[in-house]
Amino acid sequence: MIDSMLARDLLKAQNDLIISARLAHWNVRGPNFYESHLLFGRIYDTASEKVDTLVEVLRGLGYNPTFQEFGGPGGELPSYSCMPLIEMLTGYVTSYMATLLRMRDAVKDKSMAAGLVNLIEQLCEDGTTLLYLLSAAQGL
Ligand SMILES: [Fe+2]
């Protein structure tokens, strides 16, 4: 069995990143509009690509998803300018990756959940790429 609280945290962190990237993609404006629009679209696409696989793997380990995980972070975007949105998304990617690593460390019997561990590693690779793109967009 999977730690339900951790599975909920993971789906929530993933979904918060996805919906925030989507809103940033739609709402960004200003001098760097087009490159930011494309960057936020790529983040959305990358983060959402394996949602279904993650939920199915978690279901296979006994977790039942609810609406709570998919509500999004709520509130308002911090700004419509690219830099605050990049900083916001960096925070969401970082939280998501921390939750992925907590889940990986919590899997006691790696042989029973090899698919989950493998998927977490793929999601961490995706997250590392997103952090690179976000840091490069900040000139770092
Ligand atoms: Fe679009």
Image (cartoon, rainbow, N blue to C red):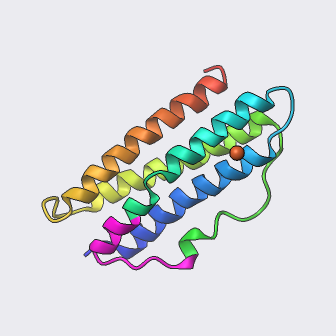
The image shows residue 53 at horizontal and vertical percentages of 37, 60
Which quarter of the rendered image does ligand 1 occupy?
top right
The image shows residue 58 at horizontal and vertical percentages of 34, 69
Q: Residue furthest right?
A: 30
Residue 132 part of the magenta-drawn span:
no
28 to the left or right of 136: right
Q: Is residue 4 above or below residue 46?
A: below
127 to the left or right of 116: right
Task: Using the rendered view, name the quadrant where residue 82 is placed.
Answer: top right
Position of the N terminus by quadrant: bottom left
Q: Residue at x 21, y 62 (%)?
A: 113
Q: Which residues are magenta?
A: 55-67
The image shows residue 93 at horizontal and vertical percentages of 54, 45
Q: Nearer the viewer, residue 3 or 126?
A: 126
Q: Nearer the viewer, residue 93 or 32?
A: 32
120 to the left or right of 38: left
Q: Residue at x 58, y 69 (%)?
A: 70
5 to the left or right of 61: right
Residue 57 part of the magenta-drawn span:
yes
Task: Using the rendered view, name the quadrant where residue 114 is placed.
Answer: bottom left
The image shows residue 81 at horizontal and vertical percentages of 82, 37
